[in-house]
Amino acid sequence: MRYLLLTAALAMNMQAMVAQSSYQVKNSVTLRNEDCDLTKMSVILPVPVSNIYQDVVGLKESSGMVLDLDASNRYLRDIKTDGQPSSGESYTLSEEFSVTLYPVYIDMAQFTTLYPYDTESAIYKRYTADKGGYIDTSNPTIRSVSDRLWSESGGEILDYARLCYEYVAANFKYLYTDTGISPIATILSDGGGDCGNLASIFVNLMRAKKIPAKHIVTVRPDGSHHVWADFYLERYGWIPVDVNARLVDPRGNYFGYCRGDGIIMSEDICHEAEFLPGEKFEGVILQTFWYWYWYRNASGTVEAEHALRGRQTDRVSIPVIGETRYDGASLSWNLFPGATGYRAKVYEKATGRLVDAIDMSADASSMPLDGLDPETEYGIVFTPLRMVGNIETSMGTYDLALKTAAIPTANEEIEAGELRVWTAGGRLFIRTPEAERAYIVTFDGRVYKTLSLPAGEYSERMPQGSYIIHIGKQSYKLNFETLNTKRGCAILHLGAPSNLQGVWRTPVYTGLPHLLLFCHRRHFRLSIYSIMDSCAVSFLRL
């Protein structure tokens, strides 16, 4: 009786990034008997697990049992000892699960302190070791190149890792799709390979200097394949590096970047799995499937076909800008799965000047964009954040734009039938199409005034402060700045978004005040008001 091992060919190609998404996935391998007198079969599928790049839940297998390869890898094995498919018939082993994939972008500037490796840790011992001819740090080329790049880096781990990434991208080509991972000597001799082989060069160079590194082996929801590399920073965690993506996009930065479009089926290479109880086999890469079959005669074969398809079940929405005002707007979004916070950076489009940087908590779904200048174009870079160990990562960036409105005036044209509440020159304006009752409430909950409004437009001067105006089911938050109209003075209001900091009156000389201001906050908005009509005439950002 004889047995035969066959492994699936591996196609590792690139495609454009997809947004963070969730999928319902079915992964299967079908074995078809082509005129073979079968006595037994053993089939293995990799089982994805949750890690820094994905959350996996709801695993259901058609048959077999799930086994551990090690702490980060599992597999589904089915040993079929009876009921073998006859000639022309098929047998399928499958697994189903739900997965959420996370893009990862890492700002390397956060690593201000690098720590020596714990040489006794499991991570260090496993991911600095050689693996036959596939990871061979004694290879003369690997030794020579690693020594040269290490010298250029000055022995700095991050600088060395980046030099290795740039070296592989500059000196090797994408070759030989569907061939799987080759020994490192073969890859170097060929001048490259597919994405898994390019990752191998990087991993070899890192391990040559005792920096933990590994392959990350994936299958995308559309069934295509990809492999990138990770390296490890002590006390921080794993950093993705996609050399092949750099070859495809020479201007892009794929150092510390993961697209979040591939389901990780296994980590590292050269796994030892039990294809039968007590009998082990070491395979180079566990990406799709392995299978064995036993037979009585020498004729016929068993053909295998792998299929993985993911049905998208959820995708985060793009953040949107709410109604813009003369002094700001609002930004809202649906919650991003896995996010531990959100950040928005606001900049002035004409100058590129950073105006504000706002951080929000994980449960926030909106943020105010306050303290902006009227009739000005702004850009907003919105970033969902995710802490991975001790590393702050971003799950992509979203670019938005807005233009603030002009400062409204009391005689501004209002559409008929529209309820409108606004401020101008320290006054409250209300335009209502029908008689209404309005309540002016202070921020501490006191009713400042109750108004019985006729249809039409109402206005009154308001004391300085912040108020909530309730009209029917509508509520409006307004800030008022009391202006002194005494001749010979100008009124200065210094404030930050959502914070009233103070009001000053200053003499006017030759039409303009001389100002000496000491600011204790990151930035302020300064409003200069006319002494004649109490209207704002200038806005400054300090």
Image (spheres, rainbow, N blue to C red):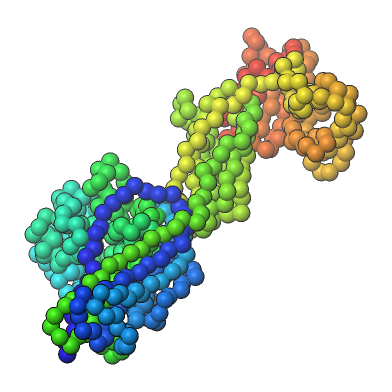
Depth check, front residue: 99 or 510: 99
Residue occupying image coordinates x 69% and y 20%: 408
Image coords of residue 235 (percent x, y): 41, 65
Rendered image quadrant of residue 239: bottom left
Looking at the image, residue 23 lies above or below residue 270: above
Query: In which quadrant of the rendered image does the C terminus lie?
Result: top right
Depth check, front residue: 282 or 491: 282
Residue 234, can we see it? no
Rendered image quadrant of residue 123: bottom left
Residue occupying image coordinates x 21% and y 75%: 34
Q: Residue furthest top?
A: 510
Residue occupying image coordinates x 42% and y 53%: 103
Rendered image quadrant of residue 482: top right
Depth check, front residue: 296 or 452: 296
Q: Is residue 315 left or right of residue 497?
A: left
Residue occupying image coordinates x 8% and y 59%: 189
Q: Is residue 25 left or right of residue 525?
A: left
Looking at the image, residue 137 lies above or below residue 503: below
Image coords of residue 45 (percent x, y): 33, 73
Image coords of residue 177 (percent x, y): 19, 57
Image coords of residue 417 (percent x, y): 77, 24
Query: In which quadrant of the rendered image does the N terminus lie?
Result: bottom left
Q: Please state the total of marks drawn on the protein image.
A: 0
Residue 6, can we see it? yes
Q: Is residue 260 left or right of residue 524?
A: left
Looking at the image, residue 128 lies above or below residue 145: below
